[in-house]
Amino acid sequence: MAWSTRKLFARLNARRVVTGLVASFFILLGLGGWFVYEKLPRIPGVPKSPVVGVPPGALDHAPQPAYAGDHPRKTGRPAEYFPFPIAIGETGPVETLFAGPSTYPFLCGENKITGAQPLVDNHKGEGVPVFALNEDGQQTDEIIGYSRDCSHSTSVSYVYRSTIDGQFHPLANAQNDIDQVTVNGKTTDFVVRLETGTINRFFYSIAVLRGEGETAEKPNTSNWNKRLIYQFRGGVGVGRRQGNVSRKAIVERRADQLARGYAVVYSTANQTSNHYNIWLAEDTARRLKKQFAALYSEPLYTVGIGGSGGAIQQYLLAQNAPGVLDAALPLYSYPDMVSQTIYVFDCEPLEYFFDVVAAEDPRWRDVSEREAVIGLATKEEFDHRFKVLENAAAFFDGRYRATANGASECVQGWRGLVPLVNNPNFVHFSNSFADHVAEKTHWSHWEDLRDFYGADQNGYANSAWDNQGVQYGLQALKQGHINVDEFLRLNATIGGWKDPTEQGGEKLWFMNGEVFPVELSVWSEHNMNLGSLDNPAPRSIANVAAIEGIFRSGHVFLGDVEIPILDVRHYLEGELDMHHSLASFSSRERIRRARGHADNQLIWMSHKSYDPIDEALDIIDHWMQKIIEHPELGVAGNKPVEATDRCFDKDGNVMAAGPGVWNGEWNHKPAGACMQQYPIYSTPRLMAGAPITGDVFKCALQPVERAVAKNLYGQATANVVERIEDLRRIFPDGVCNYNAPDIGRPKNPLFQKGGDVMIAGHPVSADYRQLGEAFAQEIEPAGEDIQPTPVSVEDPEAAENNL
């Protein structure tokens, strides 16, 4: 009996242990799920006002040709017909001036400044429902109409900064705590006039210090320093929504500049989390500037500021529409959006290869080993934002038990964005649309710009992404980091992304809204073409007309810009942030290639603890003053002596400045002082032999025999020759010849060079020079032996951090 009792207690204790372990597992799993849900991007719930209908024909998805017209730099703009200014209580224009007709569905955003609903514009069930208000001003459930175009009446409010908490509050709440600022040589209350309304269906805001004796209807310019900041913002968007506007987006964000007397304007049409149509961005910017000038006066100059997609807009507007901006302060910049897809779309196929296909090789669990192929920064002992997700999934899926220790920028910075940009069946805010609307809508970047990319016979927008002939890991092979067997296996495995008609839904938990699905894919491999050495995967072949259309429409940065540009960023490579510093040098080389020099572009980089924005604005102001005084000297001729490349430490001390501080491997020179402090990394395409400019969408192809003859494989040539039959099977149409022009880039110049450019209202002669030493690959003359061989296959909020 004693033995039985002991046995019983032992069993009970064991059961308690097991129960405790199981309970602990589910508690940890629950905490992990909460962490994932709270910390990761996820599908929002269904709002009270989803889009319930669209105008007839809006989702017909008819085939259409790619854009074949003139570049916007070459074309004129129609005269404005709208009578600016928009008065308080009135609404701005709905249809654009030149950017094309409105598209639907269109999700109304939230005006967090006024709290008002959009105005009723139809009773046909098109757009979002608008609700009646009760006597307390709260929404009821009674629908009084629908808003298809999301217009809001223009309104004005005043806010002040408090000396008590340093925050902004409605002026009516002031209790002898209004802060003071000094502007134009006199002290004044820090009270801001904040105007908001809609232009081109998007929210706009104007913020300026209150002038002496002004009224809401008639602002006074006495506390304005005559300089205008145009605020741009970033994010990855695929259209179909208005975005939200808040006081924080303009007043809090630019409080320091408002305190110095700058006026600030902003539109949600200039936030790329809402769309990437540069025509729409320009159209709205021109109109918002007209609204501002009609209320105040023409500014002395307009300087752009904004990060990520906000930086992209500045580079493209400076190129496409001289005069909209007189100077630019791009933060965390990229040259443009579409050329980022070139290497970003490589990320998940490469990560899938390392994580799953080659999982038996322990070297790939060391993320630093992957860097030789991926090019982007890696970091060991780094818990990326998907790690908890992967750990939980590992209980059900063995693929997640051998993933890398650490992460790359591909994972931490870019994961999840390829489906957003490329998959027409997925968007993270689909719950904001009625099911029948969401299901009929094609969601992708390509679709948002279908007027430029064109659409195929199935009605899906064409894609500009191509990896035919791309030899992943070529530099790693040449440098001995991988052997020829690994090189061949890698390239045989990685195909392209499937055609739109073949893509399925996404399987990321936070994307599909599931709480605890057993099936998970962080790579989206079900939407890839994958292969093996015995059966190489087919690559993606872009629509050449689509590539030409995106060049012609001004969505690719060609480098032809005249205005002063101060490219500023925090150095974030150690955080594997998507805003890698290589992009600034890609822009610089495009400028140098187009103009023969890049004297109008400065690159500043700092530790993330220091914000050099005010210092940068001072440089820009000095530069602009000199141009205004002596426009005949041009932009480079008016460059202030202090306008130099530089880098800063965490305390704001200049570590190095002057010409050559950013020299490095990118321009084939010994590393300069700043480059040594803040080294740049690469991309998968550069590691495959592409140029630093990063703007080759579809490479010219050359037979593998010619690549061998040109010593493309360096010290690995002999081993490649032994396996040349495998190489031919993997690349039956040839491999990339990056010394030849992009197949899709228009052959003739897109616009004429030379003449004057208007900067701050003054004509400034364009400064083109003879191109010196080529940093990017030399371009070979077209010849029979390097023409592409016949092809047998038919035809993604970034945060702007704190800057």
Image (cartoon, rainbow, N blue to C red):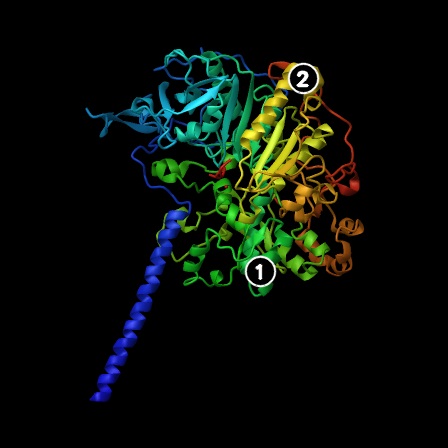
Quadrant position of residue 546? top right
Q: Distance between the residues labelled 1 and 2?
A: 53 Å
Task: Depth check: give the residue in front, 752 or 664.
Answer: 664
Identify the residue position indicated by label 1 in the image.
366
Q: Badge 2, how many Cα within 10 Å: few under 14, some, many 20+? A: many
Tell me the amino acid under the disc marked 2: Val
Residue 268: percent from left, percent from top: 44, 28
In the drawing, what numbered circle is on residue 764?
2
In the rendered structure, are the residues bearing label 1 and label 2 in contact, judged by CB atoms less than 8 Å apart? no
Residue 771: percent from left, percent from top: 77, 31
Task: Depth check: give the residue in front, 437 or 157.
Answer: 157
Q: Is residue 38 above or below residue 278?
A: below
Q: Earlier in the sequence, mark 1 or mark 2?
A: 1
Quadrant position of residue 59? top left
Residue in the image at 35% along x and 26% along y: 113
Tell me the amino acid under the disc marked 1: Asp
Count the marks. Answer: 2
Q: What element carries label 1?
A: loop
Residue 86: percent from left, percent from top: 41, 14
Q: The N terminus is located in which quarter?
A: bottom left
Q: In this view, does 495 lie above or below 125?
A: below
Q: In this view, does 788 lie above or below 401?
A: above
